[in-house]
Amino acid sequence: MLRPGQRVGWRRTLAISAALLAYGNATALLAASPGPGALVPLLSHPLAVLAALLCARRAAGCTWDELGLGRRGWACGSLWGFGMAAFMAAIVGGLILLFRAVHWTSSTAYPAPADPSATLLLGGRLLLLTAVCEEVWFRGVLHALWVRQVGLTRGVVVVALLFAAWHLTVWGWTLQRVTLQPALPLALTYPAGLLALFIAGLLFGWLRAASGHLAGPIVAHWAIDLVLIALAIGGWL
């Protein structure tokens, strides 16, 4: 096992990054397809998280603190996470009001939960399969590996780029559900959405570095996803 702080080879870091991106976009394709493929992330994401953590711990020698999963800092990190989510929600709300002021509207075909139990299930799914899994992969494993390679600032930027690339497929089929008035070309909306995801990745990465724990990014990621889903169901997105 490598000593804490010791660099891992470029090839291993790149291989782990490429494997996660391939896995994420492949499972997104399956989840978007009709039939049992939609269940694949539910079954495979927890296994992929365990595999990534095992690889980071055994093959790369990362400590739990490097992975943002140390014993200390989760409570303070969670508070930071709520603050970051409120900041991001304020930006989204301001943009929505600005767009409505210039008579630019959008609607997303996102079904509302049928009952309270469905709402709880949706919230739990967003927490476990989106916020926890993605933050362990990106602000946990990849953050630790890339910070070792290129330093903190550049590492956060690289991981934010990888985070946007993870959503290449997801953002594509999300746009298929969105109706814009007036309509905008895909050549504009597709890169704009990826840019927004990159900025979100930067904010989550900064939060991870500032708080020293994954609890912050997990809480922020989960809370802002809930806000976005609520806005879509309410007809604001």
Image (tube, helix red, strand yellow):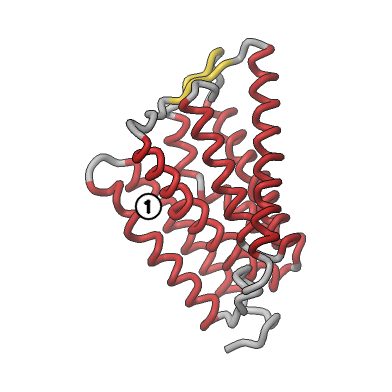
**Looking at the image, which residue sits at the far top?**
103
Residue for point 57% across, 44% down = 223
Q: Is residue 64 left or right of residue 212?
A: left
State the image quarter where residue 70 is shown: bottom right
Residue at x 62% of width, y 62% of height:
214
The mark tally for this picture is 1
Label 1 SS: helix
- The answer to whether 83 appears left or right of 182 in the picture is right
Q: In this view, does 80 lie above or below 91?
A: below
Q: Is residue 154 visible?
A: no
Question: Relative to 59, is 165 above or below?
Answer: above
Q: Quick check: can you spot residue 38?
A: yes
Residue situated in front as seen by the camera: 12 or 115: 115
For residue 105, above or below residue 215: above
Residue 222 position within the rendered picture, expressed as x and y whole percent measured from the top left: 54, 47
The picture quadrant where one finds residue 11 is bottom right
The amino acid pointed to by label 1 is: Thr
Residue in view at x 64 percent, y 23 percent: 96
Q: Does residue 151 appear left or right of residue 20 in this picture? A: right
- Which residue appears farthest toward the front when viewing the image? 116
Q: In this view, does 213 lie above or below 60?
A: above
Q: Locate the N terminus and report the quarter of the image it occupies.
A: bottom right
Q: How crowded is mark 1: few (under 14 residues within 10 Å), some or many (20 or more)?
A: many
Q: Which residue is labeled 1 in the image?
A: 27
Which residue is painted at 38% across and 52% down in the image?
A: 26
Residue 225: image location, x then y, percent: 54, 41
**On the image, which quarter does residue 99 sit in?**
top right
Picture coordinates of residue 236, whole percent (x, y): 54, 22
